[in-house]
Amino acid sequence: MAGADGDDSLYPIAVLIDELRNEDVQLRLNSIKKLSTIALALGVERTRTELLPFLTDTIYDEDEVLLALAEQLGNFTMLVGGPEYVHCLLPPLESLATVEETVVRDKAVESLRKISQEHSPVDLEVHFEPLVKRLASGDWFTSRTSACGLFSVCYPRVSSTVKAEIRQHFRTLCSDDTPMVRRAAASKLGEFAKVLELDYVKSDIISLFTALASDEQDSVRLLAVEACVSIATLLPQEDLETLVMPTLRQAAEDKSWRVRYMVADKFSELQKAVGPEITKNDLVPAFQNLLKDCEAEVRAAAANKVKEFCENLPEDNREQIIMTHILPCVKELVSDTNQHVKSALASVIMGLSTILGKDNTIEHLLPLFLAQLKDECPEVRLNIISNLDCVNEVIGIRQLSQSLLPAIVELAEDAKWRVRLAIIEYMPLLAGQLGVEFFDEKLNTLCMAWLIDHVYAIREAATCNLMKLVEKFGAEWAQNTIVPKVLGMANDPNYLHRMTTLFCINALSEACGQEITTKQMLPVVLKMSNDQVANVRFNVAKSLQKIGPVLDNNALQTEVKPVLEKLASDQDMDVKYFAQEAISVLPLA
Amino acid sequence: MSAISASEKVDGFTRKSVRKAQRQRRSQGSSQYRTQSAPVELSPLPQLKDAPSTEQQELFTQKLQQCCILFDFFDSVLDLKSKEIKRATLNELVEYVSTNRGVLQESTYPEITNMIITNIFRALPPSDNPDFDPEEDEPTLEAAWPHIQLVYEFLLRFLENPDFQPSIAKRYIDQKFVLQLLELFDSEDPRERDFLKTILHRIYGKFLGLRAFIRKQINNIFLRFIYETEHFNGVAELLEILGSIINGFALPLKAEHKQFLMKVLIPLHTAKGLALFHAQLAYCVVQFLEKDPTLTEPVIRGLLKFWPKTCSQKEVMYLGEIEEILDVIEPTQFKKIQEPLFRQISKCVANPHFQVAERALYFWNNEYILSLIEENIDKVLPTMFGSLYRISKEHWNPTIVALVYNVLKTLMEMNCTLFDELTSSYKADRQREKKKEQERDELWKKLDELKLSNTTLVQNNSHGLQNNNNNNNNNSNNNIGNQDDGTDTASVAATTSDDNNPTGK
């Protein structure tokens, strides 16, 4: 450590520590966030011998400061002299891992997990593992909770005696007195199982899993469901029936809806983990029950999984299972009393058509789609419309178009502007699938009507929609169908509508190309420079700036330039400003 | 959940009133009806009072068993007749246990508890409204209340019956029973929570063996509420029970109780919905301090640690609680805490939100607090002076300015000389602060430059070995130091001499 003395005189630790102790929390927080800078100034040795002891002793602070500290320490390895010295970081992090505030504790655990990888196997046993043990047998629940997250990172790299100790500690925490610790243990059960040897998974983990899954608190039981996925993945198929299934069956019928919800929410993962045979025998009836659950929350979670579940069914009798077991439940859900259930279903139901094929779709699914398209709740209808592409591939959209249209029209005129906004966003997609003829005939009027909506966000989205449509259908189509209407609005008595013309021109000029822009749009823009409303005039300046690049030099010099020069001497400040901006940006000179 | 239409979710800007109106449609929930298969038709049994006394107990048991049948209250027209029979029977049972002596024979205890368990212990339904705001929204009421209410009533009468024997009942009213009872405190229905409160209080009073367990479980509920879910409807009710429990604690307080105060009650102050239970919480805290005044310092330090940074409404509540504490504080305890406390109060007085400032300034209307301040004016006045002086010139709200003038006047009368000294040194102090601020900035600028040059060095050397990198880092430290030591050292030195308490603590 050559030159440490030089540091000493320049950055006395007292000064730095004063900064970390400032009375103002904000300043303290700022300093702690730059802790690495302080450590750099001190050099590695003094960071180890002076800064870290100080930090370890001042753990009583605002949680926000502690959070920043916990995060910093995770990246401190190089600042204390590399992996060789990384264990110096353990004392402050240990204290932080016992703090009450969850975010601080979690961050400390995260940092501990990170630096655990930088420990050599020897250091891990000498320094890290004892820390885990201390936390695991701490008095207050916070330290035991933190310990739960550290077992899995050290287990694979320690000797078999230490491994046995770790397993013992984990077992103790799984039956801890406080539900907080049991929850922490249950949430790490899957992760811990993954690093254990298979024999221990069978002997240790299964009994812990069974116990946690029948805990008196539902908040613990539901976490066991999550662990179930990882555990089932680890075990050989032949053991699943005896070791996992009894617990899983019980969870699917738990008296607490939270647990059943969790089962529904994890259903696809569970299905993959237990394999096709168990799926057929056990999960299908369980899934039916969840779809018919008395709580809407559970039904909605299950409805969300319908498509994925069906997709992952074993192919040999997939269709038969769906038709006889799943579809009847789905049919009921279409007229569920709860709209969240219906809209969850609507977001996936279209996906079934690819699985079931054309004939079944037409016979069984189509009536359901149509019913949902007429649902009283806009979200259900939107979800159906947003997934039209799946059906399009299987049966073609024509089958639906008759019902589709009223649904679209109704959504297009919904009283809630966010609903209108949502349907606009699907317009380009719909147009692509329905084809230009159908579009011109039925939807074009809607698209134009949105341009004069009284909500700006809708007008803006409508403008953007037109651009996408032109990109899809081409300049010629634009010239015939939409450009005349857009330009017609330039004479509207409402200045907001006149401005919409300009916004449309901004959006369309590029897609329409030079000819249409020069011959049809430019004259209108130029004429509007005489508008009596200043907002329109400065938007003319902005539009000219925008469409300038599309125009040829001749038009720019002879037509655009004089108008901009006129606007640049407008009496309105804003008009002047934007005109001058346009002049300076466009190549007019 | 179902009450909010999806379109509303799409449109984020609905008014609460609209949503409320919609919620009126279905404000009842219940997940009790689940496992029952085909509903059973009840047939009325003869009245208890008409039965000969030899058969009364038998009939009592039959009626208890009959009341174990559950009905679906979502469908209000289903099983109307049977529902009415059960209601009448429950009424009769309530009447029977509250007016008759000698009806609680040992053999009926299991029947009674079984009936209670079957009826009231259930998984609470999901909240109708995921962001239920108890202050604004109407709670979801329990649909099966016509029956459940009577069962609660019955349980209460059972516990209060003069013949009730805890020594027999403890076989049935055990830890598991209590645990399930406590879970029910999360019910959104205030009527239910009210019953639960009285019942739990009775159980706590009669079952000595369950007391520690009940306290521990309440602890766990609170800790989960604070650190995990931030959601539990019955916090106020549980605190109310605790208020009277604390009252009965023996002195000296056990470590367990002190831990409860510091690790549970104080952190409860951080909850988002503090307004819902602050009165009960403050009562509990003050109860503790009246029991053991030496807890004052840690409690106030705890409150200062959690002092709200952005929520003015909560800040006003904290100030209210501080005043309640100051009302009972011992002068020796006051001395221990006065400086940090008044630093906070001076910040509150300077708060741009006039309600916060006003609430803090009201402390000066409190005779006892005034006497404490006067006694310690040499400490309080220097802490408060800066804020008060500045606010008297700067606050936007005329009421606050007027109040501040009064406070300044009171303080001046307490110690005129000190007041004059502070007034004359005010400017100099401000300048010193400014200077210190500048020095800090410079210090950090230097440190940042150092970091910058280091990173570039590291980048240049990135193919080198890690260890080499390290050495380079150290060298560069020196380089910077040597380059511009002159000015730099001077400024740092100034900072140190200003505040001469290095490393130690």
Image (cartoon, coloured by chain):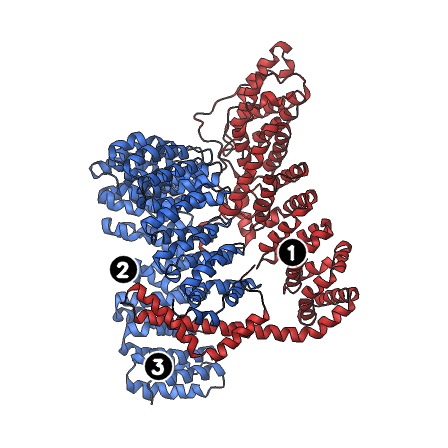
| Distance between the alpha carbons at the discs numbered 1 and 3 | 64 Å
Residue annotated with mark 3: A523
Labelled disc at residue A432: 2
Q: Using the image, tell me which numbered label, if any, was put on residue B316.
A: 1
The residue at 31%/31% (across/down) is A243
Q: Is residue A184 visible?
A: yes
Tell me the shade of chain A.
Answer: blue
Which residue is painted at 52% across and 21% down in the image?
A: B42
Can you give x and y, in whole percent of width and height, for residue A239 in the image? Answer: 27, 32
Which quadrant holds residue A355? top left
Q: Which mark is residue A467?
A: none
| Label 1 neighbour load within 10 Å: few <14, some 14-19, many 20+ | some
Same chain for labels 2 and 1? Say yes or no. no
Inter-mark Cα distance, 3 to 2: 32 Å
Question: Furthest residue to the bottom?
Answer: A589
User: Could you tell whether A562 is left or right of A550 in the image?
Assistant: right
Relative horizontal placement of residue B463, taking residue B208 as reference (left or right)? left
